[in-house]
Each structure stands twice: as C-alpha cells, then as structure tokens.
Amino acid sequence: MDSVALALIPWLDPQYILDHFGAFAVLVVCAIIFAETGLLVGFIFPGDSLLVITGLFAFDRDGQIGGIPIWVVALMIGAAAFIGGELGYYIGKKAGPPIFERKDSGLFSKANVDRTNAFFHRYGALAVILARFVPVVRTFAPIAAGVGRMNYRKYSLYNAVGAVVWGVGVTFLGYFLGYIPAVAYIVRNYIDVILLAAVVVTVVPALVTYLRNSRKAKQAEQQP
C-alpha cells in the first residue's frame, strides 16, 4: 500500500501483517477488523484489502495461516466483524446522544443524525449490510444505528448477515482468486487502487444525491 499512513505505520499494510506476525497473524487480523467496525478510530485500518490479501496469503500456504485452515480463519474474521458491529451500536446508543444532540457540531450535528436515522428506517437491512463494503462508512454505521435507536434485534440480525457476507465472503473471495494467477497478480500489486476505484464509483453518486437532497431540505426549512 502506498498511502502516507502506511509509510508512517507499516503494520497497517496487510502483507506486512501476515508476513511478520507468524502464528499470531490471524489474531492481529481479527483485532484490526474488530477495531475497524467497532471503534471510532477504526476507519484508518485497511479492512477490505486485508481480507482479500488474507485469503490469497492462505491460498499460497496450502489453505492455512499459522496452521489454521482458511475456513476457520474466515469464521474468526466474521465473528470479529460481528462483535465489532455490536460494540459500535452500544457506543452509539450510550455515548452518542450527548455529542449528536448539540445544535452544531460539524459532522456530528443533530441534523446529520436525523438524516442518518431516516436512512436506516427507510433502507433497514440494506443500509446495515451494504455499509460493510464501504470504508469509513462501516466504522460509523453501527454507531449511527445506535444513536438513532434502531431496533436492536433487527440491527443485530442485519449486523450478523453483513459480518458473514463481508468478513467471510471477501476472505474466501481472496482465497479463490488464487486459482486465477493473472488476477491474483493484479490483486496483490494493485489491491488498493482497485478498492479505491470501486469506492469512488459506488460512493460519489450517492454522495452527490445526498448533498442535493440535503440542500433542498435546508432551503425548504428556510422558506416561510
């Protein structure tokens, strides 16, 4: 990875983690996935690329990492993602309101919470599950769900589905890409560019629509 963050903190590089932590690599991967989905600072971690590279890493080592079979590794990652999402919801529910109830606190304004809450009410499962695949959003989505008091049972169910689809699914995707040498080579060398392009294509149109709707809503509120 070629970002400034990785130049300063090499252990954020997925390949570095898997190469240098030996038998503890799986635990380190799970800890990072947990932090990315459960802690506010988690957005700095390389979630998507870490999962794909973990799968490829296991493929290159007879389907194991530190003696742990890939299917166990994938389940451990899925569990870490689920637990992280549960913690994020709890943090949002308990600690979020004092921050978000302020009249004006930038990104954490009450208006943004109201919009996020409306989004969750409208799209429910889709919002929770798809958030897993968008960097930064997957860190804040559980917290926003907690702040918005989304039904816990419903959230927990969708959180579990998202954790399996993303955590287990993307890890196995990386593993099976190993069977296609040309694709595996491209992924190993250009994973960050690929993921960034995917995020831009997915997020930018949605962001533009969101900003337009927000502007229209503000104009409507200002009219007598």
Image (cartoon, grey):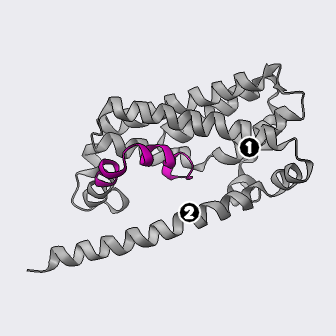
**Residue 17 is inside the magenta segment:** no
Query: Residue placed at 88% from the left, 47% from the top?
Result: 180
Q: Quadrant of the C terminus?
A: bottom left
Task: Residue under label 1, please give it.
Answer: 52
Q: Which residue is mark 2?
A: 202
**135 is within the stretch colored magenta:** yes
Measuring from the top left, give residue 37's x and y in whole percent: 52, 39
Front of the two marks 1 and 2: 2
SS label for mark 2: helix
Q: Please state if 222 lies on the left or on the right of 214 as rendered.
A: left
* Up-down relation of residue 103 to residue 73 (above or below): below
The Cα atoms of the two marked residues, 1 and 2, are separated by: 19 Å
Question: Residue at point 50% right, 34% down?
Answer: 161
Q: Give the quarter of the image for residue 72.
A: top right
158 sits to left or right of 54: left
The x, y position of residue 68, in whole percent, is 78, 20
Which residue type does callout 2 highlight? Thr
| Region rendered in magenta | 117-137
Instruction: Report the residue that reaches farthest toward the left.
Output: 224
Residue that sits furthest to the top in the current view: 67
The image quadrant of residue 56 is top right
Q: Callout 1: helix, strand or loop?
A: helix
Quarter holding the N terminus?
bottom right
Three-letter amino acid code of the residue under disc 1? Val
